Image (cartoon, helix red, strand yellow):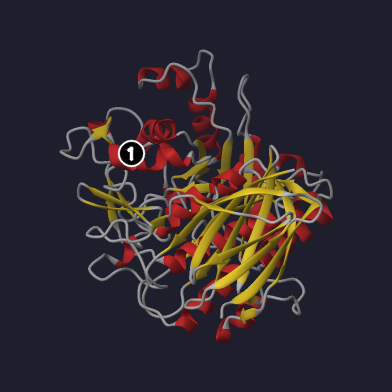
Amino acid sequence: MQSVQKATVLLDEAIDTISPYLHGQFAEHLGELVYDGVWVGEDSPIANTGGIRNDVVEALRPLELPVLRWPGGCFADVYHWRDGVGPREQRPMRVNVHWGMAPEPNAFGTHEFIALCRLIGAEPYFAANVGSGSPQELQEWVEYCNFAGASTLADERRANGRDEPFNIKFWGIGNENWGCGGNMNPEYYADLFCRYRTYAYQYPGSEVFAIASGPLGGDWGWTRRFFERACNSYWDRRKLVQGFAAHYYCGTAGTSATEYTPDEWLELLAKARAVEGVIVGHRAIMDEFDPQRRIKLFLDEWGAWHPVEPGKPMGGLYQQNTMRDALVAAISLDVFNRHADKLHMANIAQVVNVLQALLLTDGDRCIKTPTYHVFDLYRPHRGATAVRLVTESEPISDGGASAEDCRKCYLDTDADITLKALEASASIKDGVLCVTACNTHPTEPIEMELAVPGAKLGEIELVILAGADYLAHNTFERPEAVTLSAPQAVSAKGDTARIDVPPASVVRIRAGLT
């Protein structure tokens, strides 16, 4: 007999509006992401529009992705934007020093990236070079992209095929400057951030939203020392900061992306669940310096990080993607929803062929991963009001050997990091309830008892993401081994419904409320 797991939606306990930017993506010049995952060139036999793969565009466009971050990552702090503009045959060949010393032909630059964003409907987010660049280089890139008037840089943009400005809003001022972005300490980086930010001018008709490079995981010292320096210098410089970006990778468990034990399944999901501590912890420190939360918290790199697939170059970070990764994504997105008042943007790493990708390509073939289907499943949450959901669900794992590492992601070292059998979140939009939930048990089904006190549930639409088992994943030979089910109707009784949730699955429940 399957266990009953209770979930109660508290309609009168609203959290905040769920920012669509929480479903953001990331595209770095790394491995097979740009070449040939996105860019194949106009002369390629692979169907393309202006050199950009049609199959990738056709797969991504229905997701209505809100934002795409580029060109890095570590690559950002060695990238000089002028290398990627002008006639392609005249662009220099560089070496991608961070990612396998791969050749970087610069065929895909500013105009090509904007073309990709326009094709898939995403807003661009640029990461600027602080580590090896200069304030002048940043200032000129902003002017090139955003100035509508007459200037040499604006005229150069026009000569390169774009008359109207791009109006790029989001500008990251460096990336991981505690590490690959320059091995800086937080005080030195805070000074550099303010210097570079000063020259990222806001031209008429455009907006500059500047994002500072935040910490990795639970590095509370970086956050505190950055803001202490920004606040307590000769004058208060907080007004220069619009966003602050942490990174969190839950990593892996076991030795392979596709072969793992039930214990390793649970270990990785517990690590993913620990992202809550990263969000709560850094926002708590930021609130000491910014109680009005004018400065937004970003998580602009997150996800699983498995060993590279056999036969792929180590520096390319190409990995497969299974139902375990789908639950990593779903658990994370549910955490984001439950903390919609604290987190403004999140960007999973990365969109094609790298780390926890939405799509995998091979020659002229393109497949959707289980993680792709999670982002499709969760779309109704965007722009909705998150409401509190309480689960009376049995503990299933504390992450095993990794529990202490997970616990370090919390300010309160006694915080509960236990992974429950049922992980979920809820939102309301236009009178429609949306609940997303994961059965984290790798082999056992559960019965979810959903209650909405004070309201009457209409007919429920249920969509399920599951495979044949907890190891299921899509391949080029079996591209739909894991896919979303057709919508199913489920009857409710008053304010309660019972829903069967398969093992190792993610479900979405939608119902009108009266």
Residue drawn at point x = 37 percent, y = 60 percent: 482
The part of the image, by quadrant, that contains residue 423 is: bottom right
Viewer-proximal residue among 176 and 393 = 393
Q: Position of residue 239 (x, y in %)?
A: 76, 40
Residue 401 higher or lower than 353, as above or below: below
**Quadrant for the N terminus in the image:** bottom right
Q: Residue at x 37, y 72 (%)?
A: 307
Left or right? Give the position of 31 relative to 123: left
| Image quadrant containing the C terminus | top right
Tell me, yes or no, if residue 131 can be seen here: no
Establish if 194 lies above or below 316: above
Alpha-carbon neighbours of circle 1 within 10 Å: few (<14), some, or many (≥20)?
many
In this view of the protein, which residue sits in the foreground, 356 or 90?
A: 356
Question: Is residue 129 toward the left or the right of residue 13 in the image?
Answer: left
Name the one closer to the observer, 72 or 264.
Answer: 264
Q: Residue furthest bottom?
A: 401
Residue 190 in the image: x percent, y percent?
68, 52
Q: Does residue 194 appear anywhere in the picture?
A: yes
Q: Position of residue 349 (x, y in %)?
A: 47, 56
Query: Given the image, on which type of amino acid does mark 1 rest?
Result: Phe
Q: Residue at x 38, y 79 (%)?
A: 255
Question: Which residue has dot 1 on it?
Answer: 108
Q: Does dot 1 land on a helix, a strand or a loop?
A: loop
Q: Nearer the viewer, residue 53 or 368?
A: 368
Counting labels gives 1
Residue furthest toward the top? 150
Q: Would you say 70 lies left or right of 459 here? A: left
Residue 287 placement (x, y as % from top left): 81, 54
Residue drawn at x 78%, y 47% is 293
